[in-house]
Amino acid sequence: MRIFRALSALLTYPDEEVVGAVDAIGAAIENEALLTDETRAPLLGLVHDLRSRDLYDLQENYVLLFDRTRSLSLHLFEHVHGESRDRGQAMVDLRALYESKGLTGIDNELPDFTPLFLEFLSTLDPAEALPLLGEPAHVFTALAERLHKRQTPYEAVFRALAALARVQPDAALLAALREEPDPAPDDFDALDAAYEDAPVDFGAPADDCGRDGLAARMRQARRPAPGVVQAAAPRTEFTHSHSRPVPEDGRHG
């Protein structure tokens, strides 16, 4: 499904390659029959924003939103499992699902990174992709609401994902996300406090799937500074780890 590849690109760090592809991204959005006019127009607004703004301004804005604000993390399991140990197993299960469908070579990014998740969905038939998209619908809705408060056109991507999922987000899970702290990107004390939790050992090397905050900062450090399914495949659950009992073996999904 080309629309997932287009939405993945819109959520990717806006380097020269991404900005250079905005016309193709816009064409994919304009020609996507699954989108309503109400959903399509704001997406094209984001495309226009990427096309018309200064590159370094775009990069600085992206980092401020998604790398410095934990409540806007593009790592889905940050909003599902937080720092719990269940997140590590969820990562393993999601990676196994990717590999079962032939998506390999993803060691440079955590498997729950939203652009990577969408890239994976783009390789599937709609009958497989849409149910998977629906599992984190509550996360997409919460992220859209948080981005709406910041009056950023990135809101459009998560509104589109929630609409494409064609499911009502779980009310209890969405309510829990709405109650979580959502500091402004320029509230530095609150942002620092959000990353002061004790590290969690996921049972894997720290540089493979450590804390989300560390992963985000490492990802940011690699960027230029602004201005310069098989039936046996495991199923990943996008529900909060505390919302259901943990099996005796400690696994989820």
Image: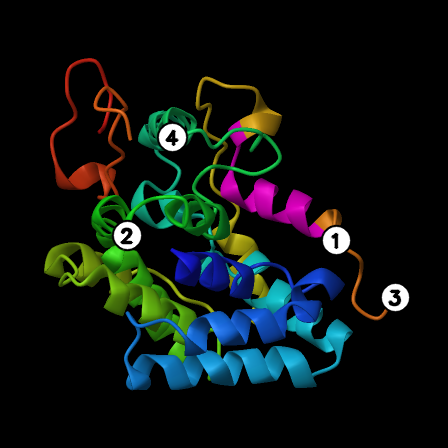
Horizontal relation, residue 221 to residue 181: left or right? right
Per the image, the residue denoted by label 3 is 228
Residue drawn where x is 47% and y is 57% of the image: 5
Q: CA distance from mark 2 to mark 3?
A: 37 Å
- Asked whether disc 2 touches disc 1, contact meaning CB atoms under 8 Å apart, the reply is no
Camera-near label (4 vs 2) is 4
- Residue 150 appears in the picture as rendered: no
Q: Earlier in the sequence, mark 2 or mark 3?
A: 2
Q: Amino acid at mark 2?
A: Leu
Question: Mark on residue 133?
Answer: 2
Task: Give the class, few, some or many, for how many residues have Cα within 10 Å of label 3's Cα (few <14, many ≥20).
Answer: few
- CB of mark 4 within 8 Å of CB of mark 3? no
Nearer the viewer's eye, disc 2 or disc 1? 2
> Colour scheme in the image?
rainbow
User: What element does badge 1 sit on?
Assistant: loop
C-alpha span from label 4 to label 2 = 16 Å
Crowd rating for badge 2 (residues with CA inside 10 Å; few <14, some 14–19, many 20+): many
Q: Does residue 236 sit above or below 114 in this rendering?
A: above
| Location of mark 1 (residue) | 223
What's under tag 3, amino acid-wise? Val
Discs 4/3, front: 4
Type of amino acid at the residue the image marks with label 4: Lys
Look at 67% across and 74% down and name the residue there: 58
Q: Is residue 130 magenta?
A: no
For the stretch drawn in magenta, what is the main secondary structure? helix
Q: Earlier in the sequence, mark 2 or mark 1?
A: 2
Q: Give the x, y percent position of residue 102.
A: 44, 29
Q: Nearer the viewer, residue 55 or 99?
A: 99
Of marks 4 and 2, which one's residue comes earlier in the chain?
Answer: 4
Q: Nearer the viewer, residue 84 or 235?
A: 235
Q: Tell me which segment is drawn in magenta.
A: 209-220
